[in-house]
Image: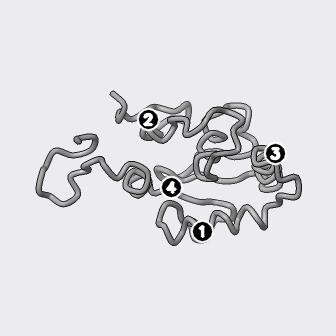
Amino acid sequence: PEWAYKAESSPGFAFPEWAYKAESSPGSRQIQLWHFILELLRQEQYREVIAWQGDYGEFVIKDPDEVARLWGVRKCKPHMNYDKLSRALRYYYNKRILHKTKGKRFTYKFNFNKLVLVNYPFIDLGLTGETGEGLGQV
């Protein structure tokens, strides 16, 4: 089903299938940074640049300059750098989509529950306790 959890190549990690649904076609400039990061994390070729680690939803940017360069290429912004990219990441803190892992450099964690609510508000997660149906019920 669409809301199934997907096993990634990293042992012990499973992420919501919906998180990998293309918001836009590959190469499109119409993409949000959080979704672009998920795209990079999904591809084996970028494991030396960015990778899942630690707790569920946690990832580390191993090569901040390269991640910024790739984001700049995707958005057609040749002057992109990590300072600008990290400013964009901080925007997600207030939305509680992402947060910085304390004490770990270049390490962040997704809040997948919040991403569902922000991007799929019509989905009943059963968070109110009224339905009891749980994730994926409409």
Determine the image quadrant of residue 26.
top right
Which of pointers 3 and 2 indicates the residue nearer the eye?
Answer: 3
Q: What residue is pinned by disc 2?
A: 17
Disc assigned to residue 57:
none
Q: Earlier in the sequence, mark 1 or mark 2?
A: 2
Instruction: Find the distance from the CA under tag 1 to the CA under tag 4.
Output: 13 Å
Q: Amino acid at mark 4?
A: Phe
Q: Which residue is mark 4?
A: 110
Which residue is drawn at the image coordinates 52% and 37% (left, top)? 20
Left or right of 91? Residue 106 is right
Please tell me which residue is depicted at 62% across the width and 69% down the height of the picture.
90
Q: Work out whether mark 3 precedes mark 2 in sequence or the reverse, and give the earlier one.
A: 2
- Is label 3 in contact with label 2 (beta carbons under 8 Å)? no
Vertical placement of residue 118 versus 27, above or below: below
Question: What number is the disc on residue 91?
Answer: 1
- Mark 1 against mark 4, which lies toward the viewer? 1
Q: What amino acid does circle 2 point to?
A: Glu
* Residue 73 numbered tag: 3
SS label for mark 1: helix
> Which residue is at 41% across, 58% downward?
114
- Distance from the alpha carbon under mark 3 to that under mark 4: 23 Å
Q: Identify the mark nearer the N-term, 3 or 1.
A: 3
Name which residue type carries label 3.
Answer: Val
Circles 1 and 2: CB distance less than 8 Å?
no
Q: Position of residue 102 (x, y in %)?
A: 57, 70
Circles 2 and 4, Cβ within 8 Å, touching? The answer is: no
